[in-house]
Image (cartoon, rainbow, N blue to C red):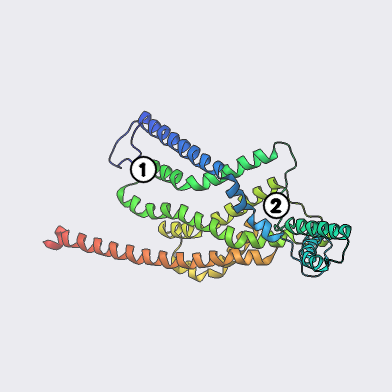
Amino acid sequence: MPALKPIGHEERLSLVDHLDELRTRLIWCIVAFAISFGVCYWQNNRILDIVNKPVKDAQSVKDTGKVSNDPVDQSAIFQKRIGVLATSLGPVLKSVESSSMSAADKAAVTRAIEAARAVALATPTETGRRPITLGVTEPFLTTFKVASYAAILLVLPFLLFQMYAFILPAFTPRERKAVLPLLLMVPALFVMGVAFGYFVALPRAANFLLNFNKDNFDILLRAQDYYSFAVLFLGAIGILFQVPIGVLALTRLEIVSTKQLRKNRGYVVLGIAIVAAVATPTPDPVTMLVSMAPLLVLFELSILLAALLERRRAKEEALSAAEDDELDPTILS
């Protein structure tokens, strides 16, 4: 199997050699995904706990003293209060017991104390909910799907490296110098977007959607629907974080300049707002604003980086022009 290193631009390969290289890289991608999937499926309980955390936090039952119209909340609060009652009832019953009681009364008090202790031990400590499954095969298939998504995310840097290594020989060294930083930024920004979506945007979206008008609905969340929503949501946030790549690509190709971007900043902000509203499948303005904030920061940072690259390129062109003037024979004569 050929070495997994990028081929030099000066090397000349036949079509068969290119196809052989592509096959080799695809085989390594499949092997890497299989290993990653094996690890993720082995740790599927931990991965499911991580993915379910926004739902459990959004639907956790809190006893605020108010009467809830949700029967699931009512049942959870009732069980919790029964546990509190049983915990406090044990010492009271113990103090009631005295030597003047008959043997039957002492036995009854002892049974009551044991029952109160058993109820206290059985009091549920987990008040959060988890997604439900309806089909016979749905638990297995859903777990398989979530493990696959996690494996793709875990092996993504390796997959992108193989893609880059295959297409980079088509670029000249100068083009590679300009393109390579952009290509390396894609996975980094995508991972940053997924992390931001999971820790910031997804909990807010889940809390809004799963508690919206909850007094009029018995909200039971199906696992398949939630995981599909979470993957699409996090993927959309990860793609939105590619804004700097688009800005740098447009400026490097000289389609637009940083001066034009600054001048039309208002239209860009409006465009980011529209994209954030479409990409985040939640109707609440809070989630949209939370998604917009990092995009605006990334846009401003990309303008600064593009301006820096423009000044650097202008200096290189001026230096190259000066060297050409020094070597011009008409000037020397």
**Image height of 278 relative to 308, above or below:** above
User: Seen from this angle, which residue lies furthest top?
Assistant: 16
Q: CA distance from mark 2 to mark 1?
A: 49 Å
**Image height of 201 relative to 180, above or below:** below
Residue 125, picture quadrant: bottom right
Q: What's under tag 2, amino acid-wise?
A: Arg
Q: Residue 249: where, in percent of width, then height?
A: 44, 56
Residue drawn at x 50%, y 71% as measured from the top left = 263
* Residue 69 horizontal side relative to residue 319, left or right: right
Residue 19, picture quadrant: top left
Residue drawn at x 68%, y 66% as measured from the top left = 285
Residue 130's tag is: 2
Q: Residue 266: where, in percent of width, then height?
A: 56, 70
Residue 270's tag is: none
Q: What's under tag 1, amino acid-wise?
A: Ala
Residue 8, picture quadrant: top left
Q: Residue 167: where, in percent of width, then height?
A: 39, 42
Is residue 282 among what the camera can see?
A: no
Q: Secondary structure at mark 1?
A: helix
Is residue 229 among what the camera can see?
A: yes
Of 312 and 206, nearer the camera is: 206
Q: Secondary structure at mark 2?
A: loop
**Residue density around tag 1, few if under 14, some if 14–19, many if 20 or more, within 10 Å:** some
